[in-house]
Image (cartoon, rainbow, N blue to C red):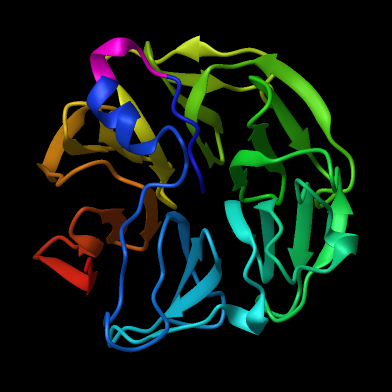
């Protein structure tokens, strides 16, 4: 998922690096194509162990061996917002030079792929809306915040229709079975009513990237330069120090995958591995 950072001035170092949504971490061998820049989101490929990397110039595949290919289907659009729900991929952002006109311009709205990124179809708000935050709940509900407003939008019918919810200055969103969480300048906020209202969660760090594990616990990148994790009792602990601003973050089982100045990095209980180094 992609974040639109709206935190306080104390976080100016992080904000300067990420607020535009186009922080550059070039990856791959500089002497051979493809080379990917400006990573906006990262998720597991529903078919297996590969990672889907949403970037300024399309969605790429990263294998466990570190091989990068793409953009998938030759679609070089700017995937500012990106999420996976079941086997479906949802994206938002801006068209590339060869993006079909039916997907929308200057903003893609919500587009969908049912063949893992090989082809895309327009779903809603095409031409008008650019989601910088986009995430899917376990039940398939989509949550997003457009770049042009602070109101949360939600869809319960696979992105076809959207309902405006609370006004929310969020940097990121995460969803569990219990409800919706938002990373905001006052800490983590929680909504149990689908995003109509939010209340602060006590004792949380200030985060600008937020993800949920399958057990309902959270983790996130803090404005203090630390990767934080929540335990089952709601207590937050430091996992490790980050290098630069985190551009993308996801959780796959017990693996944390993030993108910072090192490149694409995997943090597991036993080790930290750079899957694809920055160049």
Q: Is residue 143 above or below residue 65?
A: above
Above or below residue 130? Residue 99 is: below
Counting from the top left corner in percent of width and height, residue 233 is at 27, 30
Residue 204 appears in view = no
| Of the pair 191 and 34, the residue shown nearer to us | 34
Residue 193 lies, in percent from the top left, at 68, 21
> Is 10 within the magenta?
yes
Residue sitting nearer the eye, 193 or 122: 122
Residue 261 visible? The answer is: yes
Magenta run includes residue 90: no
User: Overall secondary structure of the magenta stretch?
Assistant: helix
Q: Is residue 204 above or below residue 126?
A: above
* Residue 139: percent from left, percent from top: 69, 49
- Magenta range is 7-11
Residue at (30, 78) in percent of width and height: 28
Q: In this view, does 63 lie to the left or right of 21?
A: left
Residue 209 percent location from the top left of the image: 38, 37
Residue 162: image quadrant is: top right
Residue at image x 89%, y 48%?
A: 160
On screen, residue 168 versus residue 14, left or right, reads right
As drawn, 102 above or below 94: below
Residue at image coords 47%, 79%: 61
What residue is at 34 percent from the left and 87 percent from the top? 67
Which image quadrant: the C terminus?
A: bottom left
Hey, which quadrant is residue 274 in on the image? bottom left
């Amino acid at each position: 998922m992609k974040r639109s950072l709206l935190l306080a001035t104390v976080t100016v170092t992080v904000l300067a690096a990420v607020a535009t949504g186009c922080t550059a971490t070039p990856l791959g061998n500089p002497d051979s194509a493809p080379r990917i820049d400006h990573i906006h989101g990262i998720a597991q490929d529903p078919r297996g162990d590969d990672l889907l990397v949403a970037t300024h110039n399309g969605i790429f595949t990263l294998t466990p061996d570190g091989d990068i290919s793409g953009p998938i289907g030759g679609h070089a659009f700017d995937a500012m917002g990106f999420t996976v729900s079941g086997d479906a991929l949802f994206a938002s952002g801006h068209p590339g030079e060869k993006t079909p006109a039916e997907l929308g311009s200057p903003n893609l709205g919500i587009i969908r792929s049912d063949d893992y990124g090989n082809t895309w179809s327009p779903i809603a708000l095409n031409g008008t809306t650019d989601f910088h935050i986009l995430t899917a709940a376990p039940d398939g509900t989509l949550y997003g915040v457009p770049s042009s407003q602070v109101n949360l939008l939600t869809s319960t019918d696979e992105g076809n229709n959207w309902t405006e919810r609370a006004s929310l200055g969020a940097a990121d969103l995460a969803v569990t079975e219990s409800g919706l969480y938002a990373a905001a300048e006052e800490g983590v906020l929680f909504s149990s009513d689908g995003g109509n209202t939010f209340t602060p969660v006590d004792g949380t760090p200030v985060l600008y990237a937020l993800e949920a594990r399958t057990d309902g616990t959270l983790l996130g990148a803090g404005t203090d330069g630390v990767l934080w994790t929540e335990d089952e009792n709601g207590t937050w602990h430091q996992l490790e120090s980050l290098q630069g601003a985190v551009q993308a973050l996801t959780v796959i089982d017990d693996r944390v995958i993030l993108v910072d100045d090192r490149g694409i990095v995997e943090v597991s209980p036993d080790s930290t591995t750079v899957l694809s180094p920055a160049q």
